[in-house]
Image (spheres, rainbow, N blue to C red):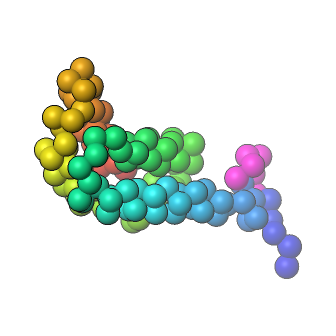
Amino acid sequence: MSKKIYGKLPIENEAADLAPSIFINRAVDEINKTIEWMKSSKEAAQPLLVFIEILLMFPAKFPSEKGYIRRKITVPEWKAVFDEWYERVNKKIPEEYRAVTRTTADELFAQLEKL
């Protein structure tokens, strides 16, 4: 049986409609790996906030993926691990970047919670 095209957009066909989920899964996997690392990390540099920014690009481009993303993410756990990490390492973050790191994290977690 051939795949159907059901709209004008590149995503609107049966061969492509699941494509965003591949990349969402990858983003969530990277976030979960980073969360595990952050549980014991004493390093000030971390990729978590960028991974969250990348994940948040998907519902902006593909609004129908919001429900899928909600089912894949564990915002309370991620936020708790970030908070613990931040308390542990914030003095290692250059002073001029500490507040913006905290504020950015709070904003990103709030956006995730609104999905």
Q: Quadrant of residue 97?
A: top left
Q: Quadrant of residue 35?
A: bottom left
Examine the structure image and report whether residue 74 is included in the region drawn in magenta: no
Does residue 70 show up?
no
Residue drawn at (29%, 49%) of the image: 113
Examine the structure image and report whether residue 7 is included in the region drawn in magenta: yes
Q: Is residue 95 left or right of residue 52?
A: left
Nearest the eye: 75 or 43 = 43
Region of the chain picked out in magenta, as a range: 6-11
Whether 113 is drawn above or below 50: the answer is below
Q: Is residue 54 left or right of residue 3?
A: left
Nearest the eye: 89 or 114 = 89
Residue drawn at (23%, 59%) of the image: 40
Q: Could you say where residue 54 lies in the image, as x and y percent from the top left?
A: 49, 44
Q: Is residue 83 left or right of residue 66?
A: left
Q: Quadrant of residue 50?
A: top left
Most prominent secondary structure in the magenta stretch?
loop
Whether 71 is drawn above or below 80: the answer is below
